[in-house]
Image: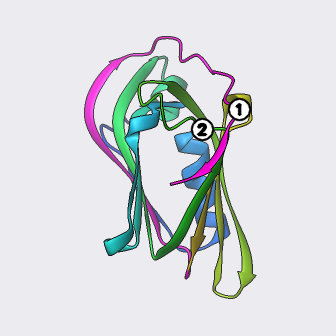
Amino acid sequence: MTQTIDKLKLIALDREGLGVISAQAQDTCLRRADLRWLPGQKRFLVSGMRYDWVGAEEGRAERIGSVLRFDRVLKVSHLGLDEGDESRVLNLLAVTFEMTDPPSGMVLLAFADGAVVRLEVECLEAELVDIGPRRPAQECPGHALTSAESF
């Protein structure tokens, strides 16, 4: 008997936990405008349509609306994102964490075609939450992104 998970909620406080979130968030489609830094709250949000890898194992090809949240964010920078094109489609490939001065470090969000967002964090606090709706999966194209700027 297979078990269907309607909505996913994952929390990561270390590199291993973030690896699980990264695997589930792989191939999330979003627009440049869906990346939001809230400096007053020390929070960074990524909202998009996450490919449902658990559902894929059960034969379903679906995407679900989700939010990836990072707390205790001190600084955000990026390479390869053009702030002038808020509608550009991005494809999230991986999320990693490197400790610099424990417990602080850098979270890297890697996108197709080489774009990267770097979050300098006091410590790792991440959450991936599905918020819906579900839709049949369609292609999520990557785009060449070439400029370097900070948020």
Q: What's under tag 1, amino acid-wise?
A: Thr
Return the x and y of residue 79 as percentages of the image width and height: 68, 46
Secondary structure at numbered mark 1: loop
Query: How many residues crowd mark 1 within 10 Å: few (<14), some (14–19), many (20+)?
Result: few
Left/right placement of residue 36 relative to residue 13 reads: left
Secondary structure at numbered mark 2: loop
Return the x and y of residue 71 as percentages of the image width and height: 42, 71
Closer-to-camera residue (110/23): 110
Q: How is the image coloured?
A: rainbow
Return the x and y of residue 78 as percentages of the image width and height: 63, 51
| C-alpha distance separating marks 2 and 1 | 7 Å
Q: Which mark is residue 81?
A: 2
Closer-to-camera residue (85/95): 85
Q: Which residues are magenta?
A: 122-151
Q: Which mark is residue 146?
A: 1
19, above or below 121, in the image:
above
| Whether residue 1 is visible | no
Number of dots carrying numbers? 2
Left/right placement of residue 20 relative to residue 86 reads: right
Q: Which mark is residue 45?
A: none
Q: What's under tag 2, amino acid-wise?
A: Leu
56, above or below 100, in the image:
above
Report if residue 148 lies within the magenta region.
yes
Report if residue 4 lies within the magenta region.
no
The structure residue drawn at horizontal position 59% and vertical position 54%, both measured from the top left corner, is 20
The structure residue drawn at horizontal position 46% and vertical position 17%, both measured from the top left corner, is 61
Return the x and y of residue 32 as percentages of the image width and height: 46, 35
Closer-to-camera residue (83/104): 83
Quarter where residue 39 is shown: bottom left
40, above or below 136, in the image:
below
